[in-house]
Image: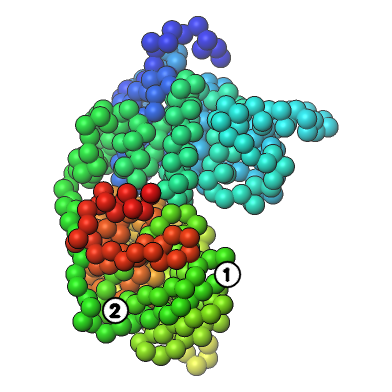
Amino acid sequence: MSTAAQPETVPALRLAHISKIFGGVKALNDVSFELGRGEVHCLAGENGCGKSTLIKIITGVYTPEPGAEMDYFGQRLTSVTPNQARALGIAVIWQDLALFSEMTVAENIAFDTLAGGRPRLVNYQKIHTMARAALARLGVTLDLDARLNTLPISQRQIVAIARALVSEARIIFMDEPTASLTQAETDRLLDVVRTLSAAGVAVVFVSHRLAEVLEIASRVTVLRDGKLVGVYDTEGMTQSRLTELMTGKTFDKVVSAQDRSADPPVLEVSHLSRAGDYHDINLVIRAGEVVGLTGLIGAGRTELGHTLFGMTRPDSGTIKLNGQPLALRSNRDAIAAGIGYVSEDRLALGLIQPQSIADNMVMAVLARISGSDGLISTRMKTDTVNHGISSLAIKLGQPADAVSTLSGGNQQRVVLAKWLATQPRLLILDSPTVGVDVGARDGIYKIVRRLAGQGLAILMISDEVSEVYFNTDRILRMAGGRIVAEIDPRRISLEQLEEAVYA
C-alpha cells in the first residue's frame, strides 16, 4: 500500500461524516477531522465525548457507519483494518503503553518489526542497531539492555515512541501521554514531540492538561457529546476558552485560600527526616484546612506522603495526630488512626479495576461492616455504598458494575468515597486529578472544599502549580527534600509561584 507519490500538500488524514452507533447510542455523530503532515494536533474533549472512538475508527478497530469518507495520505478508503492502518504508518500509544515489562529496551523497540515472521535465531545485533537508530531520531540515549520494569514511566514513553518509529510510523496518536509525568518529564516529552514534527511525523495529542495542549499543538479539534464543536488555532486560545468549548460551561478560577490559623491543629510534624527522601520536615495542618505541597521531581513530596500514611518509616522526628504521638508501622496503623491516602496511581494502587464499584468503595472498611462471624453485612455494605454514591454524585450504571467502566473523574470519586468511608481526620491527596478531564476536575475541587468545610484536614500534593494555587489555603514548596517556603496564595500571583517552583 504505497503513499510515496502523494504530494506534500495532501493531508495525512481527512475524515468526514464519521458516525458510530453502539446499542442505539451515537458515540460519534457526523464528525470531521483533518491532520496535516508533520502537524501536532490536539484532540480535546471530556471523557465520553468520542475521542477514543474516533481514534479506533482511524486505526481500524471500529468500522464507521455507512457514508463515512476516509482519506489516508490522499487514498480514499471506505474502511480500514488494523493491519492496513499499520501499513499506512499509523500508530497509537495508549495510556497503558502496551509494552513488555520483562523485556529490554531494545527488545521492546524492535518487537513489532521482528514479531510475526518464521521462527529464527534472534539477531541481537540487528535489534540493538534498530533500537539505537530509533532513539537517535528522538535525540535520546537509553540503556538498550535495561529491562523496562526498571525504567521510570517517562522513559517507557520514549520506548513506546521509538517502537512506533521503527515501524515507520508517519502518524502517532498519543493518549494522555503526560498523565503520570512530572513537569520536568513532561517538558522532555514535549521536546520529543517537536523533534517528531520537525522530521515530518504528524502527532495527535490527547491530554487533559490544557496548558501543554496550547504549548505543543498548532490546532485543536474539540468534541462534545459525540459531535464536532469546531477546529481552532491554538494561537490566541486560552485555557478558560478551551474549557468552555469542551464542556459548554464557564468555570471561574479564583483563589480560594482562607486563614485557618485559629483552628485546632490536626497534623503536627516536627523535624521529620528519612535518608535519601526528605530532611527536617516541620508542618502543621489544621481542621478544615487544605494545605498544598508542590515542587519539582525529586523534591520528596510523595515520599513524605508515604511516611505520613505509614508506608515508610522516618529515621527521626515526630508525627502527631490530634495531639497524640503516632508511631506508624504500616498503612493499617494509619487507617486506624484516621488517615486516608488517595494515591497518584489510581489504576495500580487506588482501585482494583476488575472488581465492582461497590466492592472498591468498602475495601478499606471491611472489618467495620462485618459481623462477629466475619461475614459482611449486606445492609451495612449497601448503606455505605449508597451514601458514597449520593454524597459524591458518582455517575454510574449499577454499583455491581466493574469500576473500570467508569470515567476517570468518576473513578477518582470512588477512590475518595473509599477513604471517606473510613471517617478520616486527615486526608492526603496525591495528584488527585491525574487523568481527569477539566469538567470532572472542577467537581473534585468542589468536593475537596466541601470536605474541608466539614472540618477535615487535607494535604494536597501536586506538581501542577495552578492546582495548589487555586485550591488550597497555604502552599508548602519542597526542593531537595526540604520545605523551603510557605506561601499564601492571596499574596502572590500564579506566575510568581510558577517562577519560584520551576526556577
Give x and y (percent) for residue 12.
42, 19
Query: Image point 45% across, 15% down: which residue?
Result: 73
Residue 373 drawn above or below residue 443: below
Q: Nearer the viewer, mark 1 or mark 2?
A: 1
Task: Give SS at disc 2.
Answer: strand
Task: Give SS at disc 1.
Answer: loop
Q: Residue furthest bottom?
A: 372
Residue 151 visible? The answer is yes
Write down the residue under mark 1.
275
Residue 162 visible? The answer is no
User: Which of 252/417 is in front?
Assistant: 252
Quadrant hosting residue 478: bottom left
Residue 140 drawn above or below residue 74: below
How would you rate the neighbour count of disc 1 (Cα within 10 Å): few for under 14, some for 14-19, many for 20 or more?
Answer: few
Give x and y (percent) for residue 498.
31, 50
Marks 1 and 2, how far apart in space?
27 Å
Precedes in sequence: disc 1 or disc 2: 1
Give x and y (percent) for residue 72.
44, 18
Colour basis: rainbow
User: Which of 57/218 is in front?
Assistant: 218
Write down the residue under mark 2.
286
Query: Image point 38% across, 49% down: which residue?
Result: 503
User: Which of 380/129 is in front?
Assistant: 129
